[in-house]
Amino acid sequence: MFLICFSCKRRRGQDREVVQPDSIENTRNFNNEDVNNSILKESEPKEKTNQPVVTSSENIPKNLSELFKELEKSVFIVFGIINDKQFSQGSGFFIAPNIGITNYHVLEYSKTDVIEIKGEFYEIIEILDYSRKEDKDFIIFKTAYKSPNHLKISSEFPKIGEETFAIGSPHGLENSLTKGTISGYRDNHLIQIDATIDQGSSGGPLFNMRGEVIGITTSGITSGLNFAVNIQALPYKRYIKN
């Protein structure tokens, strides 16, 4: 049973009704005692650096394994607590020290939202911007955790046929890596990819092979047919300095 003993700011200016969603990404073994014991106050970075993980061509790792090792530090699990028995689970990532992004549908029905980093839970304290799942399906938010690592967003429009990879937490399996190719563009802001996207991966970053974010993984249809929202469709620039 969930016994959440803290409050958070309501988004959209009013309390939300508890709704039974058609499909909740809740296969992860989520222990409320863990949350109550480790919902944390504002945390200062443990490292002194406050720069994007990838800052120049000279700093780009040579292979995918090296890229993953550097980039996964900026990716986290997201939980939306709906009531004392239900929660949703997705993925998210930092674009600034305490500014994160995930999908709107991950937190659509929740009353309280937290992120998990290395087994510790931190509250989402403010919703900065959002677009409903019928449109661009994103939420930009502020967290109580100030990360020493955040991701660089690509300024280039990726081309069909380019290789790509994603980091997310399908079914709660923290920071799993999948790789694929850009297959096409749909509805202006959707990137079609063949990299695997499963329940719990929603809201994670989609990268080019330079380790720059090009999209937010959003939906998995079938094997080889998945989608991400083009990061350039989001108003992220007002929340970052780089």
Image (cartoon, helix red, strand yellow):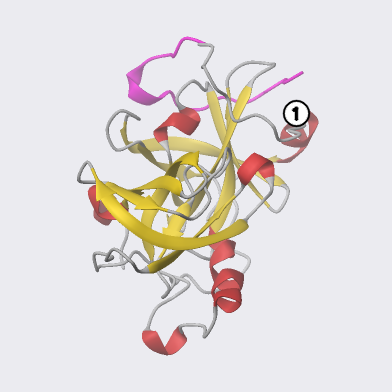
Indicate whether 179 appears above or below 239. below
Asked if one can make out residue 101 in the rendered structure from this viewpoint, the answer is no
Image quarter in which the N terminus is found:
top right
Measured from the top left, where is residue 222 in percent x and y? 50, 40
Q: Looking at the image, which residue is at 67% across and 23% down?
A: 5
Depth check: give the residue in front, 160 or 144: 160
Measured from the top left, where is residue 87 in percent x and y? 62, 25
Measured from the top left, where is residue 13 in percent x and y? 33, 20
In the displayed structure image, the side of residue 119 where residue 149 appears, left or right: left
Amino acid on which the number 1 mark rests in the picture = Asn
Q: Looking at the image, which residue is at 36% across and 54% down?
A: 215
Indicate whether 47 appears above or below 226. below
Query: Overall secondary structure of the magenta stretch?
Result: loop
Q: Give the residue number, with chain letter if any, for mark 1.
A: 32
Q: Which residues are magenta?
A: 1-18
Q: Quadrant of residue 64?
A: bottom right
Q: Looking at the image, which residue is at 39% across and 35% down?
A: 127
Indicate whether 76 appears above or below 219. below
Magenta stretch contains residue 3: yes
Q: Secondary structure at mark 1?
A: helix
Depth check: give the residue in front, 141 or 73: 73
In the displayed structure image, the side of residue 61 where residue 137 appears, left or right: left
